[in-house]
Amino acid sequence: MKKVYSVKDIDDLHRSSALGSIPADAVITPSARDRLNELGVQRARRTDAAPASASSAGGVSVDERGIDQSVRANSPKADLERLFNSPAVHELKEQICDVGRRLWQRAYVDGNGGNLSIRLTEDVVLCTPTLVSKGFMKPEDLCLVDLDGNQLAGVKNRTSEILMHLSIMKAQPKARAVSHAHPPYATGFAVAGVQPPTCMIPEIEVFIGRVPIAPYETPGTPEMGLKVAELVDKHNTVLMENHGVVSWSNTIEDAYFKMEIVEAYCRTVLVTTQLGVQPKQFSPKHLKDLLDIKQKLGVPDPRIGLKECELCDNDEWRPGVTCAVPAKGGESTSATDPEAETVVKAVTDEILNRLKG
């Protein structure tokens, strides 16, 4: 089997001045390839090499991440352990731990909340463990499971919410990585049952789009996973009623980026509604321009192709109400009405007098 070189391998070879010893047919992980470029090492591309997804002469199929695609959930235990402990998978473990730290540092998770996963092969998935803070995870804490949630490798028990991740991966073949957390602003929308409005900030329109709400089901149950999975064919980010947020992508970092985007957006929308004015929206024409950009980037959106009159439909959006007492004459003004102030003062004085009595 061809040797897989990770960033650590490249650094070790660089320290020992042995970068020239890398075989021409070696499998270099993307991060390791970037490190070689940083070091100014150019490796000739083999003209006879098969594509990353094609099988080699030895019958081993390796993808662009350096993952052996021939390993299945029913493979011998030794093959599963070899995959689980391979340099390419170790690099993905480090990525998961890095994202876990970012989730924890931003207070998107607390206690041992949140979970992350990456699909390695057709029916083998790498995931976070249960009862471990995402801010302090180590690569050796992670687990290997099959698409039914059965644990295949790892010293700690897999996350209790893995069934949701697996339901998403089954329903959406492009979902190679899933991130679930409880960012407070977006989760606030989920608890209120309020779908975030559209046509307010360009970034969320381009990278996410509409964010639906999946009905509540008990965490960790198959029912919860199915409710979310019903939405992932058209949406890459979903609010989970009375629970949190889940996002998927091709990489765990991009799934995390979507979590950041939706949280920042919900925070901005909430702040806007507290300013006492009706939030401004850009026009359907401007949204159509953004959807055109999105289409060129290859990001799907169910709104692509809709007429302008069908876009920016926020009929169900009801921002927080700001109470204002109109001045005499019925004209609305931001100035304080003296008569209203007198009434408020009288009521306040009466309450205080009764409390003293």
Image (tube, rainbow, N blue to C red):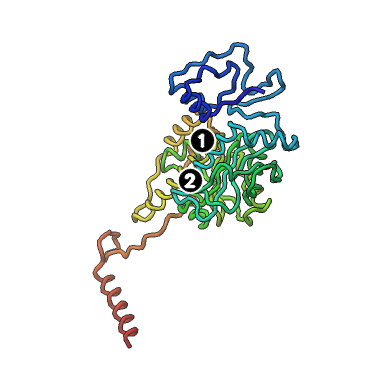
Residue at (56, 24) in percent of width and height? 28
Nearer to me, 252 or 349: 252
118 relative to 329, above or below: above
Give residue 317's position: percent from left, percent from top. 47, 52
The answer to which of 301 and 286 lies nearer the viewer is: 301
Residue 354 picture location, percent across and down = 34, 85
Q: Which comes sooner in the sequence, label 1 or label 2?
A: 2
Q: Nearer the viewer, mark 1 or mark 2?
A: 2
Q: In the rendered structure, which amino acid carries the disc numbered 1?
A: Lys
Which residue is at the far bottom?
357
Q: Can residue 296 be seen at all in this image of the molecule?
A: no
Residue behind mark 1: 307
Secondary structure at badge 1 equals loop
Which amino acid type is marked by label 2?
Arg
Residue 101's tag is: 2
Quadrant location of the N terminus?
A: top right
Secondary structure at numbered mark 2: helix
Q: Quadrant of residue 165?
A: top right
Q: Is residue 152 visible?
A: yes
Q: Residues within 10 Å of mark 2 (few under 14, many from 20)?
A: some
* 319 sits left or right of 64 in the view: left
Residue in front for this viewpoint, 280 or 81? 81
User: Could you tell me residue 262's position as x and y percent?
Assistant: 47, 45
